[in-house]
Image: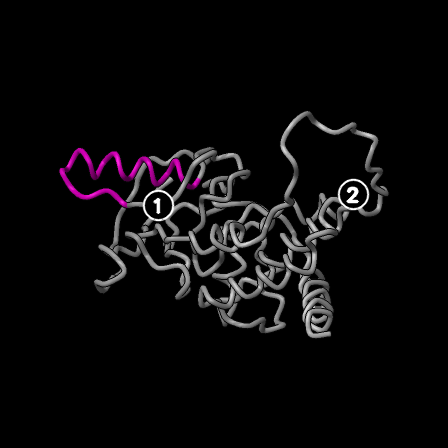
C-alpha cells in the first residue's frame, strides 16, 4: 500500500510549524500506524534527514503515551482504540493522511507530534492517590467493597491519561480525565477519608494548569479510547460542590 502523508513538523513550542508532505510505499496492511511512521523514519535516517518525533511506549493500548490526530480524529478513524492499535488496513491504498499533534495550551508541543502532558502528572500529584500507612499488607477481606462500587471504580480506573479528551474538546477541558480519577478513588472505602480534600485540590490544580471548562458537547466521551463516561463529570461536579460547601461551614 502507498500513502501520501501530510505531517505537522515543528521544532518546539516557540517556533512556527507547518505541514510537510511525505510519500510512503510498500506499506503492509498489517502494519500498525506507528510501525508505518517507524518505516518512514528509517528512510529519513538513511537520507540524513531529521526524523519525525512522536510519543509511544507499550504499543499495546495500555500506557496512554501515543496520541495524535489522524485526519482530524483523535487516535484515528476506528473508535475505542489508541493510535498504536490502529492498523493500515483501515485506510485505502493511495489515501492522503493528515497527521497532527494534540492541540491545547496546557499541552505545549515539544517537537513535531510530541506534546508535553506533564500537566496530567501534576494533577495526579496534587491529590490523585490514597494515603496509606507503610508496613505489612492489610488483610484482603478487612475492607469489604460492594460489587457495584468495585465495578464503578474499575470502569473509571480504565482511563490511561492519553489526553484525547483534552484534544477533542473545543475548550481543551480536562474534566473527563480528572473526573475519572476522582470518581475512581472516591468510589472506594479507602478513598472516602480524603474524598473532600481530593476533589477540591485536583480541580484547583486542573484550573491552574490552564485547561478550559467543559463544553457539554460530549466530544471527550466519543473520542476516549477507553470509553470513560462523561457522567463522571457530573459526579465530580457534585462532589466538588458538596466539598466546598462543607469547608465553608
> Taking 75 as reference, is 86 above or below it?
above
Q: Position of residue 225 (x, y in %)?
A: 58, 49
From the viewer's perspective, is the residue at label 2 or at label 1 nearer?
Answer: 2
Q: Quadrant of residue 179?
A: bottom right
Residue lying furthest left: 48
Residue at image position (53%, 66%) is 173
Q: Residue 53 or 28: which is nearer the viewer?
A: 53
Q: What range is drawn magenta here? A: 33-52
> Taking 139 as reference, is 105 above or below it?
below
Q: Position of residue 115 (x, y in %)?
A: 37, 53
Residue at image position (23%, 64%) is 16
Secondary structure mainly formed by the magenta segment:
helix
Residue 36 belongs to magenta span: yes
Q: Quadrant of residue 201?
A: bottom right
Q: CA distance from mark 2 to mark 1?
A: 35 Å
Residue at image position (50%, 61%) is 166
Residue at image position (39%, 35%) is 35
Which of the two discs, 2 and 1, labels the residue nearer the N terminus? 1
Q: Residue 227 or 146: which is nearer the viewer?
A: 146
- Name the residue tied to disc 1: 54
Amino acid at each position: 500500500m502507498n500513502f501520501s502523508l501530510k505531517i505537522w513538523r515543528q521544532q518546539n513550542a516557540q517556533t512556527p510549524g507547518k505541514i510537510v508532505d511525505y510519500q510512503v510505499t510498500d506499506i503492509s496492511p498489517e502494519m500498525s500506524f506507528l510501525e508505518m511512521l517507524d518505516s518512514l523514519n528509517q528512510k529519513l535516517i538513511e537520507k540524513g534527514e531529521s526524523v519525525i518525533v512522536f510519543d509511544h511506549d507499550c504499543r499495546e493500548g495500555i500506557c496512554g503515551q501515543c496520541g495524535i490526530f489522524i485526519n482530524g480524529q483523535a487516535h484515528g478513524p476506528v473508535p475505542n482504540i489508541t493510535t498504536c492499535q490502529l492498523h493500515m488496513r483501515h485506510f485505502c491504498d493511495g489515501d492522503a493522511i493528515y497527521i497532527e499533534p494534540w492541540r491545547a495550551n496546557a499541552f505545549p508541543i515539544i517537537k513535531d507530534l510530541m506534546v508535553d502532558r506533564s500537566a496530567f502528572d501534576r494533577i495526579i500529584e496534587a491529590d490523585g492517590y490514597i494515603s496509606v500507612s507503610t508496613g505489612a499488607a492489610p488483610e484482603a477481606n478487612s475492607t469489604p467493597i460492594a460489587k457495584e462500587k468495585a465495578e464503578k471504580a474499575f470502569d473509571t480506573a480504565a482511563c490511561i491519561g492519553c489526553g484525547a479528551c483534552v484534544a477533542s474538546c473545543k475548550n481543551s477541558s480536562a474534566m473527563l480525565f480528572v473526573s475519572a480519577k476522582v470518581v475512581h478513588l472516591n468510589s472506594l472505602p479507602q478513598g472516602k477519608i480524603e474524598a473532600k480534600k481530593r476533589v477540591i485540590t485536583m480541580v484547583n490544580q486542573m484550573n491552574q494548569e490552564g485547561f478550559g471548562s467543559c463544553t457539554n458537547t460530549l466530544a471527550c466521551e466519543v473520542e476516549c479510547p477507553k470509553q470513560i463516561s462523561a457522567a463522571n463529570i457530573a459526579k465530580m461536579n457534585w462532589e466538588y460542590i458538596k466539598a466546598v460547601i462543607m469547608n465553608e461551614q
